[in-house]
Amino acid sequence: MGGSFVPCEVPVNLGDRSYKIHIQWGSLSEAPTLLGRHASAEPSHSGLGKHLFLVTHPGVQSLYGEGLQKVLSREGYAVDTSTVPEGESSKCLEVASRLYDRMVEAGVKRDSVVVALGGGVVGDLAGFVAATYMRGIRFVQIPTTLLSQVDASVGGKVALNHPSAKNLIGAFHQPSFVLIDPETLTTLPDREIRAGMAEVVKYGMIHDESFLAYIEDNLDDLLALSPDPIETILRRSCEIKAWVVERDERESDLRALLNFGHTIGHAVEAVMGYGEMLHGECVAVGMLAATHMATECGLCPPEVGDRLRRLLIRIGLPVTVPSQHTDGILAAMKLDKKGRAGKMRFVLPEGIGSVNLVEVTEEALVAHALDSIMNEASGNG
Ligand code: GLY
């Protein structure tokens, strides 16, 4: 697999916080050149040191971190590596605090660069630490999961969890560079590839019908991780995310559309317990429920939900959750921080490729939407 892969660069244009997303099969081995070009080339940082503080998980460290460290050291980079335990529980102040200690010990300075190598947890945690250490130093995202390659690594949202809510403690801190090597997906469990595909489908649903059709037409090759179609979906997903973030970096409006499927999805995730269902799986059922709600409101024809549902089933994503969780999910949604002044806001489709942010005051609509993902458990769950 791979070999003739053509590099592609997606720009994220944010004035003096602009950066590039470099997508190329096998590009981890070119990290020294790419980091030199992108992470060290800011004119405001003349005399830049070559000190990197790499944050990763033990598993990713043995798969990719050690090799990365070797090629970087060979090219004159000084690399200090810190590993954090796998899983959502690492996104907390205690783990962040240990990282600050390690950074002080390692002599991390203003011109050092934090490198996040791993999935969304590592990216959010390392990004948060970079955003706060010495009031903010530069960081580079090297995402190794599909979910983080198409979403979390782009856009500068970095955060830790609080016991009361996910991502409650956070900042906007744009990376200086995002390096995506799709070859890292080959060591990802199949279930995580399918879960990541939910976020890819989301981009088609919110912004681009032809992209959704591309996913439908190339699904077998995508799930087999063929380099060309994988490059295409990574590039298009990143382009759409960049387009949104460029217009609404701090989520005053447009960026909230990226939360399609997430209001219900986050509630499902919280109620089922992090780990039982993966984030992307929760987003899949959340997108279906939101689409059902849109149809009930007369905003979109039922064919939209039917098409989405068929695609999610083909991907192997869940389309239902056990019905005993209905009340818990409803309660969790009311607590969600995106709700404003007691009202719940949902991203609802008008058709494939077009969504709107809608305030829903009628609780019955929400309950019906939840029913739509509960009742058919025997059919396709
Ligand atoms: N994951 C949604 C966003 O970055 O805004």
Image (cartoon, rainbow, N blue to C red):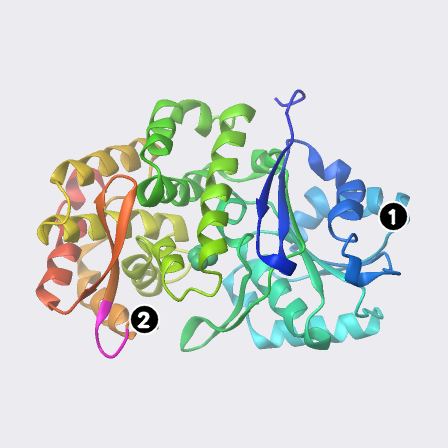
Placement of 60 over or under 30, stated as above or below: below
For disc 2, the marked residue is: 336
Q: Is residue 341 magenta?
A: yes
Bounds of the magenta segment = 340-344
Q: In screen coordinates, is 121 left or right of 330?
A: right
At a point 76% along the width and 47% down the height, the residue shown is 35
**Quarter of the displayed picture in which ligand 1 can be seen:** bottom left
Indicate the secondary structure of the residue bearing disc 2: loop
The reply to whether the C-beta atoms of the residues labelled 2 and 1 are less than 8 Å apart is: no
At a point 89% along the width and 44% down the height, the residue shown is 75
Of residue 189 and residue 319, the one placed in the foreground of this image is 319
Q: In screen coordinates, is 301 left or right of 45?
A: left
Indicate the secondary structure of the residue bearing disc 1: helix
10 Å crowding of disc 1: few (<14), some (14-19), many (20+): some
For this orientation, the residue located farthest to the front is 15
Query: Image quadrant for the N terminus?
Result: top right
* Residue 73: assigned label: 1
Q: Is residue 170 magenta?
A: no
At a point 37% along the width and 58% down the height, the residue shown is 254
Of residue 132 and residue 224, the one placed in the foreground of this image is 132
Of residue 146 and residue 341, the one placed in the foreground of this image is 341
Q: Quadrant of residue 7?
A: top right
Q: In screen coordinates, is 215 left or right of 161?
A: left
Give x and y (percent) for residue 253: 36, 63
Of the residues shown, which amino acid type is indicated by label 2? Asp
C-alpha gap between disc 2 and disc 1 = 45 Å
Placement of 141 over or under 111, stated as above or below: above
Give x and y (percent) for residue 324: 18, 60
